[in-house]
Amino acid sequence: MKTLFLGILHLLGLTLSASPVSILVNAPTYPGQQVVLYRYLDAFTLRMEPIAHGRTDAKGDVSLIAEVEGTERALLRIGDVGADLFLRPGSYHVQMPKPRADQALPISGSARVNLLFLDLDHMDVNALVSDLNERLDAFVAEDLATDQDAGMEAVSKVRSGTGTMVKDTARKQPDLFLTPRWSEARVDTFERKLQRFYAGVKDPWFQSDVEYGIAGLRLGPRANDRELFERYLKDKPVLYDVPEYTRFFSAFFADHLMRFPFRTDTDALLKDIQEGRTDSLKALLAKNDFLKSPRLNELVLMTGLYAEQGNAQFNRAGILKVLQELGDRSAFPEHRAIAANMLWDLTSMTAGTLLPKLALTDTSGSPMDMDALLQGPVCLMITGIRGSYGEQELSALEKLRKEYNGYATFIGIALEDSPAQLATWLRAHPKSGPNWFVPADRQQLLDVLRVRSVPVLFILQGRVLKASPGPLPSQGLAAVLHGIKVKGDEEQKLRPDRGVPPPRR
């Protein structure tokens, strides 16, 4: 009854109050590791925010408590691996498995595993969604088993690589299209089977996920777009937090700006984007009768501009202006939040923005305030201090620091070490300089700085990012530092005292 009530409130667009969720995590292969629970802020940018922190004990156990509203997609991260799950108020008991032996562990911590749920109710949303995904994957794989060339890519588009594809047995020639379309009869039959199988599930959120999972199967190069629009989008609520809905919406309106207004009203579209004319852009989209609805119209505009922000034909400043206006004044609160996330994604840690506050400790384990060091030109390097690649860059940085000391401040952050380990390393490498620190929370630092690989170097003027990222010590940093030196020498010459302090009296 509680699940049904939550689902009805969601579909009616009513606000849900936050309620607690507790997660007991068992991770025996991750003792003493930092644990972070994130929520995804929206399904279009996939921006996340942490909602709970903890650290596993010697047995690998930790308990987390957070607040959630309705059904929220989340990521549980322990050390260098993470697992997706859905959260609703209540309690969960999960086990984090270790990744496969051949699975890469990127510095961003994005290597994914599948959580094992212990004592999970078979009607829980996680169990239901997992079961549905398996059935959708099996339907896709059944038809693609004899078309490996086309099928493997199609499966990845449908389900981001989950499930196992059957090997090509017929050596069939690749199809023209990589995304096939099955006969209406087969999809209809499969839909009826799913409806009968899930008939006892009185959860509107999940039933919507089923409906749009089927809708995704109807997409394809020979699909009738009008029929799909009439059936699944026209006069229907926009289900921002239902995975299969957002997947279907994104696929249905993929490249819409380029396929319609760009072809029919090229000059007007480019001019309106350049000048950031939100209302004019909406009017262009509304020429397509699929986008008469203000909500759909605006969402397609936002997602279209966000997807095309790297298109050289579109003015980036104009795109940012439109997103800023929608973030400030959209009539739809969901769109204000999504636009704000898009702006954050496109502007955070870019040149001209301020370096976020960083929680660091020095070699004694004491908190370090970097403000005193962020004066004038600064080279901030984030790296592991072990490994051949890191050692190569550290050696190059050491030479540059010696040559340009006094013209720039050099700061290093060692990711993988404790304060004591860093102190030991610095004693063995005295020429590396004094300004070395470790993050108080490694994963939080990576999240804040949006670091996806190391070593990485940022060039700042005070707290302002000038190059983000900048060239590495072995790959062009010398030229940047030479320019800083030349500029500094010129400024010294222009000073009345020529840079020489007055004599003491």
Image (tube, rainbow, N blue to C red):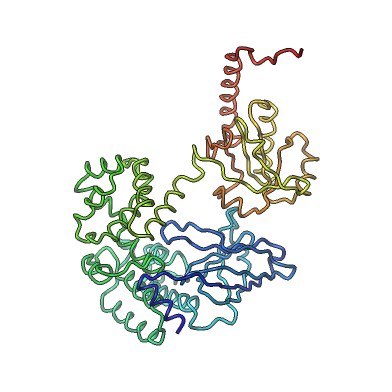
Position of 350 with respect to 188 (left or right) is right
Query: 159 or 424, which is in the foreground?
Result: 424
Residue 20 appears in which quarter of the rendering? bottom right
Residue 244's x, y, as percent? 38, 69
Query: 168 or 474, which is in the foreground?
Result: 474
- How many marks can you see? 0
The correct choice, above or below, for 462 with respect to 505 in the image is below
Q: Name the residue at the front extreme.
A: 505
User: Where the C terminus falls, by quadrant?
Assistant: top right
The correct choice, above or below, for 84 with respect to 390 in the image is below
Please name the residue shown 65% across and 49% down the image. Answer: 359
Position of 491 with respect to 333 (left or right) is right
The correct choice, above or below, for 403 with respect to 364 in the image is above
Please name the residue shown 63% across and 40% down the image. Answer: 381
Query: 51 or 363, which is in the foreground?
Result: 51
Please name the residue shown 37% across and 57% down the image. Answer: 335
Residue 399's x, y, as percent? 69, 30
User: Where the N terminus falls, by quadrant?
Assistant: bottom left
Residue 106's x, y, as percent? 58, 54
Residue 256's x, y, as percent? 28, 55
Residue 209 appears in which quarter of the rendering? bottom left
